[in-house]
Amino acid sequence: MTTPCIICVAITGSLPRKENNPAVPITISEQIESTHEAFEAGASIVHAHVRNDDETPSSDFEKFAALKKGIEKHCPGMILQFSTGGRSGAGETRGGMLPLRPDMASLSVGSNNFPTRVYENPPDLVDWLASEMLTYNIKPEIEAFDLSHILKAKDMADKGQLVGTPYIQFVMGVKNAMPVDRDVFDYYIHTVKRLFGEDAPWCAAGIGSNQLTLNEWAIAAGGHARTGLEDNVRLDRDRLAPSNAALVRRTVDICEQNNRSVATWQEARRILGLRMPETSTKGQAA
């Protein structure tokens, strides 16, 4: 039986601004509304950043807390994934929101080049973020910008720094990092299966116009998909995406074209080995 496809929506990120696309949600209320629309369209994971009022990236604990509260209220059961990426802060400030205990958090396990700078993920910071995720029972999503990052995840799993089977996300199309290359993509899949087993879940994210390509490749190959305005603000060369939900619906269409069902939040949680919300388990048989 074909595994349902988990759709992750990356709603905001740290870079896109209203001037790039007016639909980019900046305020907490905008983010909650945009997430709710994407959830109803088929997304079961929301990848979340927060912003300051001037649209610059933020690591503000209270903003993350308000976002979590709103998403849990309006999108019950949706998997909440906080970003610990380097654009929102430096050092341990990147994990300052982890005590809020989201279901998941992104974890970049190695450094690489970005368009105009080095994306630094020094080993001591990676180890600290992983330990915080263990402490608060948060499942990391390993963001693999390079093959070595998949191998690093295996090393960390063997050392007990990661619990369960890691969830690996291939990130392709960042300028100066890994380009969109089909042979590399296929070898990433081969490496994940070799290291973690044939049934190990994996995801792919493409940047800019590459988003559609990676959605198509991942869904056809049995993986999971990430979409959203963080990575791409357009539907095509001539049209801005009117919402995160529109990008989710496009991904749902690709699933239908490949005869794959879209994972419900319950199915997504089972696939990833995540706990069910307490309210959803009441009255269910043990």
Image (cartoon, rainbow, N blue to C red):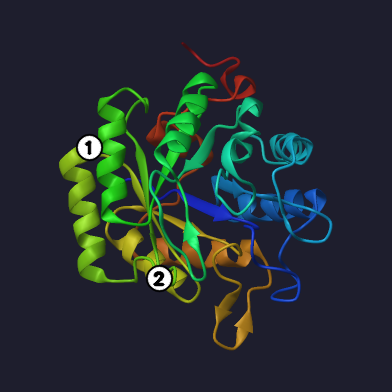
Residue 258 percent across, percent down from the top left: 33, 63
Q: Quadrant of the N terminus?
A: top left
Q: Residue at x 48, y 77 (%)?
A: 209
Q: Which mark is residue 28?
A: none
Residue 148 percent across, percent down from the top left: 27, 50
Outermost residue on the left side: it is 194
Q: Residue at x 28, y 46 (%)?
A: 150
Residue 275 percent across, percent down from the top left: 50, 24
Residue type at numbered disc 2 = Asn
Residue type at numbered disc 1 = Phe
Outermost residue on the top side: it is 286
Between the C-alphas of marks 1 and 2, the distance is: 28 Å
Residue 11 percent across, percent down from the top left: 63, 56
Q: Residue at x 66, y 28 (%)?
A: 100
In the rendered image, which quarter is residue 237 located in? Answer: bottom right
Residue labelled with disc 1: 196
Callout in the foreground (1, 2): 2
Instruction: Name the secondary structure under disc 1.
Output: helix
